[in-house]
Amino acid sequence: MTRIAFLTASCMLRDHPDVRKDYWEYELEIAALHSACAERGLSLEPVIWDAPDFDPSGFDAVMIGTCWDYMEKPDAFMARLERCDRESRLLNPLETVRWNSRKTYLKDLAARGAPMIPTVWAQTADADTIHAAFDTLGADDIVVKPVLGAGAWRQARIRRGEALPAAAALPPAECMIQPFLPAVGEEGEYAFLFFNRTFSHCARKIPAKGDYRVQSEYGGHEEIHQPSEAELALARSVLDCIEGDLLYARVDMLRGLDGQLALIEIELIEPYLYPEQGPDIGPIFAEALKSLLEA
């Protein structure tokens, strides 16, 4: 059997003292992928990414899975990935991960023609920066996000005239600020999943009533979405802006004020793959992994 390490985090294990509320998403994901991989001679083995005894050289490849605490210790995470890259084959590739780990990659995609949400980039999420962003964006309702972050970590929605959140609830360093788009509550976000650039499925992510965050830990849920040809072509056009091998890519899009889908982000590091919304995810993923390893 070809051995592939599936990197996850200790906080994703149900018996961990600080287990995350969405730990079950790891269980669903690994269950959906494991058997299909085994049928093709691929042993997908969960490994805690920062475990002291993890030896990448014992695996034919290393897949970055549900490492959902990495933004809290980014230097250690990158050091571990660098070791995986030296001693095994990292999927997705290290340079792709480095590029995708900072949301400034969106500037590159904008320059390549991807449909984007208007954005203000800033060094700090302080009061002056936030107040100026309302005028720059021509918006009375904005969302402030960290440049290095995931899963709505230290992200905040702020309305003009409201008191600002505490500093601990805002991005700790560089940030990006965008207008709040009402479509997130009215329609939800769309997550297009591709494996080795082959389309697998699309999930519509819907926040809990009164919230705008679509992650399950905040009460969000997902539905299967059958994209139109135009929607799928738009998602593919974003993917086509990126070169190189991609075991997985999740293109997240949201309808803008002009009525067209725009890119929120493209997840190339540790996206949740929404297995419940992808009935054929196992075989599609396993074939993608097998073809990449044999190329």
Image (tube, rainbow, N blue to C red):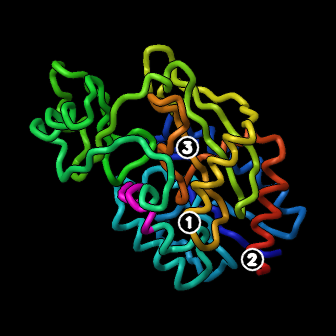
* 228 versus 113 height, above or below: above
- Range covered by the magenta-colored residues: 98-108
What amino acid is at disc 3? Answer: Asp
Residue under circle 2?
Answer: 293
| Mark 2 or mark 1: whose residue is earlier in sequence | 1
In this view, 144 is above or below 237: above
At a point 64% along the width and 29% down the height, the residue shown is 222
Location of residue 48 by image quarter: bottom right
Kind of residue at badge 1: Ile
Residue 252 badge: 3
Q: Residues within 10 Å of mark 3 (few under 14, many from 20)?
A: many
Q: Secondary structure at mark 1?
A: loop
**Distance from Cα at disc 3 to Cα at disc 1:** 15 Å
- Image mark for residue 242: 1
Evaluate if marks 3 and 1 touch, with contact meaning CB atoms under 8 Å apart. no
Residue 23 drawn at (x, y percent): 57, 40
